[in-house]
Amino acid sequence: MSRPPDRTDALARALDYPYAAPAGSYLFRDGRALPYRPPGRGAHGRRVPVIGYGSNRAPEQLARKYPGAAEIPVEAAWLEGFDAVHAARLSGYGAVPATLAPCPGMRVAVSVAWLTLAQLPAMHRSEAIGVGYDFGVLEAPLLGEHSGRLPRALVYVARSGAFAPAGEPVALAGIRAEGRRWRALAQAEMQEYLRAALAPDQPLERFVLDHADNRAVRQQRAAWLAKTAQPWHEPRFRVLAACDPL
């Protein structure tokens, strides 16, 4: 008997994380990736650079967060001294999401979403700032494909820290990096790792869907992830509240 389409979509949303993204810069408009156009003043004022290193790089995820007629320049960039790793938490839709971890000597491919101040609240809600993620300013070397070197940018980092079962984080296999020193797992491999540890007799599909279907199960599994978390300690990062001026 085939699985209902909505369950198939839910499973794909979890296992496809962090989703496909163009290798270069693009303009996100009305849910699509179009040829890049440099950021100017948006319809609601100036734009600010927000680093995306997980699903926020992808048009598919931006379309979920901005279902209307949004227009966002998304610039490809390299962030030096960090890697994109699995966070020690679970998203509400069942994926093990991303966070940043300091890693001197390497650089990771990220995006810079140039958001208007009017577009920031939707991103804040999706990242659950103050609960799932902290929001702030990161002063670290960031090289944009079109903007060149940016001295600082805004970013969200997981409050739970990085999942580090062997004393070091686990990188996201789907994110390009240079000089990567940690092992990398794709989302399906990460979920299989968790299933083998927490529910070895349960099929992977059911295990993943339980994250999204059952909040209590998700919280129990997130607590297990947190036992080996590597906290985020980065002196170049300053937390901002949603109401702080930018």
Image (cartoon, rainbow, N blue to C red):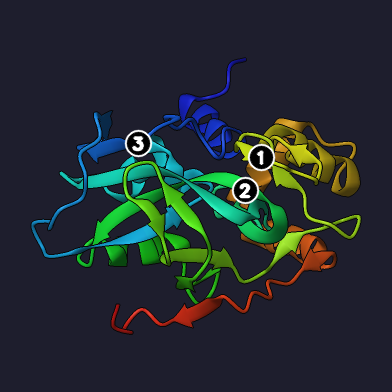
Q: Which residue sits furthest front?
A: 148
Residue at figure coordinates x 27%, y 49% from the top left:
66
- Disc 1 marks which amino acid? Glu
**CB-based contact (under 8 Å), mark 1 and mark 3:** no
Mark 3 or mark 2: name the one nearer the start of the chain. Answer: 3
- Residue 214, can we see it? yes
Residue placed under numbered mark 1 in the picture: 178
First-in-chain label (1 vs 3): 3
Relative height, residue 157 to residue 37 (above, below): below
Q: Which mark is residue 97?
A: none
From this view, report whether residue 28 is shown above or below residue 12. Answer: below
Name the element at disc 3. loop
Q: Along the line of sight, which residue is nearer the eye, 54 or 214?
A: 54
Which quadrant would the N terminus be assigned to in this image?
A: top right
Near-viewer residue (244 or 131): 244
Residue 81 in the image: above or below residue 130: above
The residue sitting at 44% across, 43% down in the picture is 57
Rate crowding at label 3 as few (under 14), some (14 to 19) or many (20 or more) other CA atoms within 10 Å.
many
Taking the image as drawn, is residue 88 in sight?
no
Q: Amino acid at mark 2?
A: Arg
Specify the farthest residue to the top: 1
Q: Which residue is mark 2?
A: 107
Q: Position of residue 161 (x, y in %)?
A: 69, 67
Q: Which residue is drawn at the image coordinates 81% and 41% (left, top)?
A: 183
